[in-house]
Image (spheres, rainbow, N blue to C red):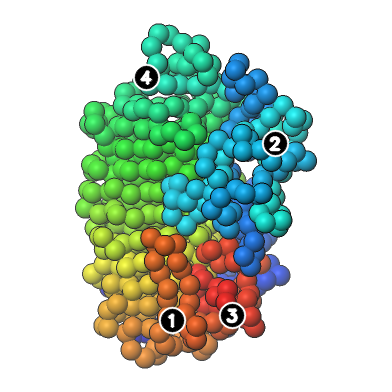
């Protein structure tokens, strides 16, 4: 089936469910309409800054087989201060990427002009995969006293090939250490660590980093209902001088709000202060694993949460502007309540939207509660500002254990004219496996403006996309694979007349009969195996080279960081077949 009216389950007003409409952005960055789209005047901040603050996503680097670095845990760190026993060592920094090699051999990291060529420069096994997501590798290394303060981009060289650069600055403040097994009061040094995180929270100032050693941290350490709570302004950090909480290399620091949890102790980390980094820790939460505010960086954590229902929330909750949630494993939800989610974007974002990327969201039982939801319903913007673009990309969402919706654009804090329209939310290069639940599509929109490019919906249990409701202003569904495991499902369920649909591949529910004039039909021949990190199109897939070319300029890579296009044109879906 093709385009049909949306059932009530897709657009219900009480659970973050929704539908969509759309405008296109061409590769030059002009907003407008192509292929029958409707120009509603919506801002496309991914390309054009309309004056409300920072705009647009970072370009995801790509290659055709060479090394790629995607993100780091820290953006600022000192080149000395690790320990008295190793006075030339500074902070440990971790980078994540692809094609880094399974052993180091002659490969090395460069920080600015300094090459780290000795095995002793590295704090963990080179190129570890599954730390914590299965489709990325990581490398951890010490800064050293040869590195001068200032800008020092990070690169990796593998088999003589040099990667892209990640922005980084050498500098900052103190390095502190906490060890759950320590005895005595401690001084926070490597040799004499604190036993309690409360000491670190009391001591840190902008630019400082606190490393947590192996152990279980299961108390409320500084008040509130959390393991750690940084109140508004408690630490005056900024993006140029952040504060970081990081797991010690090669060890597991577990923050546990579940064992002793209750409705008065339900969250592991709550950051109301801005510019806080949380990286490389494990979390076992009664309800919320992390609640983050402006300019937060939630990087490379293993987050188990959502064990108990409070009032509707997320394992990760993002409030405010310019937060990034990169490379986390988010799992373990068991409330069976549609008001809970894997990642929940809320709050107002008038300066810059939030970015969710390279996360692995799996094994969550939240009924039809979407595993990623954008919902500004509760924490709305004032009438004189508007939500900037959020970017949701390169995530793997697996519903094979429990059916659910994958991604939902539910409320963008807009009640119609004369308020200024929110900018579009961009959803691209995501792989959605076995999602969709009775009466509810795998991906949906029911408000404002959204753009869906190059996603792969594999084996939806119900509909593919749903776009409906009177609050939808614009929506595009372009270059997506929509594979249904439901012969009676709708590829796109919609009641929105302005929906732009173009160059999608349809398979599993019979012949397509909708408005996509460039529709491609047939088995996409998806290769999909999480255990072996295998995601590809089979030779001869009808998706190869059949995508629309006039897409946003920032869509330069596929899910695996392969540079697009390979061959004569863009492949449809999240994967660009490298062999062709």
Mark 1 surroundings within 10 Å by alpha-carbon count, few (fewer than 14), some (14 through 19), many (20 or more): many
Q: How far apart are marks 4 and 1 (CA)?
A: 53 Å
For the residue labelled by badge 1, is the local secondary structure a helix, a strand or a loop? loop
Q: How far apart are marks 2 and 4 (CA)?
A: 33 Å
In the image, is residue 555 above or below residue 249?
Answer: below
For the residue labelled by badge 2, is the local secondary structure a helix, a strand or a loop? strand
Q: Which of marks 4 and 1 is in front?
A: 4
For the residue labelled by badge 4, is the local secondary structure a helix, a strand or a loop? loop
Q: Where is residue 351 in the image (x, y as percent from the top left)?
A: 60, 46
Snapshot quadrant of residue 175: top right
Mark 4 surroundings within 10 Å by alpha-carbon count, few (fewer than 14), some (14 through 19), many (20 or more): few
| For the residues bearing labels 4 and 1, Cβ distance under 8 angstroms | no
Q: Residue at x 42, y 73 (%)?
A: 527
Q: How far apart are marks 2 and 3 (CA)?
A: 39 Å
Numbered mark located on residue 524 in the image: 1
Q: Mark 2 points at which residue?
A: 169
Mark before the other along the chain sequence, 2 or 4: 2
Q: Residue at x 40, y 34 (%)?
A: 252
Residue 108, can we see it?
yes
Q: Nearer the viewer, mark 2 or mark 4?
A: 4
Q: Position of residue 71 (x, y in %)?
A: 58, 48
Mark before the other along the chain sequence, 3 or 4: 4
Numbered mark located on residue 181 in the image: 4
Q: Mark 3 points at which residue?
A: 580
Q: Which residue is drawn at 73% across and 41% down?
A: 115
């Amino acid at each position: 089936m093709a385009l049909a009216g949306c059932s009530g389950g897709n657009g219900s007003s009480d659970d973050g469910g929704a539908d969509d409409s759309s405008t296109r952005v061409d590769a030059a960055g002009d907003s407008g309409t192509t292929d029958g789209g409707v120009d509603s005047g919506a801002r496309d901040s991914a390309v054009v800054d309309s004056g409300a603050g920072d705009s647009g996503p970072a370009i995801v680097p790509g290659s055709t087989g060479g090394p790629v670095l995607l993100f780091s845990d820290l953006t600022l760190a000192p080149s000395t201060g690790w320990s008295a026993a190793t006075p030339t060592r500074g902070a440990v920094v971790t980078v994540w990427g692809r094609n880094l090699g399974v052993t180091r051999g002659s490969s090395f990291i460069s920080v600015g002009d300094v090459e780290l060529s000795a095995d002793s420069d590295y704090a963990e096994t080179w190129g570890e995969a599954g730390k914590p997501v299965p489709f990325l590798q990581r490398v951890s290394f010490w800064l050293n006293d040869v590195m001068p303060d200032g800008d020092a981009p990070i690169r990796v060289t593998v088999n003589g090939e040099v990667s892209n650069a990640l922005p980084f600055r050498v500098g900052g403040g103190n390095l502190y250490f906490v060890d759950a097994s320590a005895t005595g009061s401690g001084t926070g040094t490597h040799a004499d660590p604190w036993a309690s995180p409360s000491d670190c929270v009391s001591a840190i100032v902008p630019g400082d980093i606190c490393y947590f050693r192996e152990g279980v941290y299961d108390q409320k350490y500084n008040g509130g209902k959390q393991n750690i709570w940084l109140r508004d302004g408690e630490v005056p950090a900024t993006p140029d001088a952040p504060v970081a909480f990081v797991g010690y290399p090669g060890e597991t620091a577990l923050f546990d709000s579940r064992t002793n949890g209750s409705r008065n102790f339900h969250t592991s980390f709550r950051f109301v202060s801005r510019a806080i980094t949380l990286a490389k820790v494990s979390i076992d939460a009664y309800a919320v694993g992390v609640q983050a505010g402006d300019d937060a960086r939630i990087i490379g954590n293993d987050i188990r949460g959502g064990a108990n229902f409070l009032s509707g929330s997320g394992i990760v909750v993002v409030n405010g502007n310019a937060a990034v949630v990169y490379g986390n494993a988010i799992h373990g939800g068991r409330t069976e309540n549609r008001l809970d989610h894997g990642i929940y974007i809320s709050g107002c974002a008038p300066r810059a939207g939030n970015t969710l990327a390279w996360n692995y969201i799996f094994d969550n039982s939240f009924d039809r509660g979407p595993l990623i939801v954008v919902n500004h319903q509760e924490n709305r913007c004032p009438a004189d500002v508007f939500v900037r673009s959020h970017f949701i990309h390169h995530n793997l969402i697996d519903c094979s254990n429990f059916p659910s919706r994958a991604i939902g654009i539910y409320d963008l804090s807009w009640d119609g004219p004369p308020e200024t329209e929110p900018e579009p939310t961009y959803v691209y290069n995501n792989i959605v496996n076995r999602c969709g639940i009775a009466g509810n599509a795998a991906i949906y929109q029911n408000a404002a403006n959204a753009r869906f490019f190059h996603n792969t919906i594999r084996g939806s249990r119900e509909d593919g996309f749903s776009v409906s409701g009177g609050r939808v202003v614009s929506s595009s569904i372009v270059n997506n694979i929509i594979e249904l495991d439901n012969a009676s499902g709708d590829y796109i369920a919609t009641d929105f007349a302005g929906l732009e649909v173009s160059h999608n591949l349809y398979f599993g529910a019979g012949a397509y009969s909708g408005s996509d004039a460039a529709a491609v039909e047939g088995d996409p021949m998806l290769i999909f195996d999480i255990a072996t990190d295998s995601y590809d199109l089979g030779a001869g897939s009808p998706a190869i080279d059949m995508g629309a070319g006039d897409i946003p300029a920032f869509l330069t890579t596929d899910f695996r960081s392969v540079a697009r296009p390979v061959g004569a044109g863009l492949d449809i879906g999240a994967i660009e077949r490298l062999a062709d």
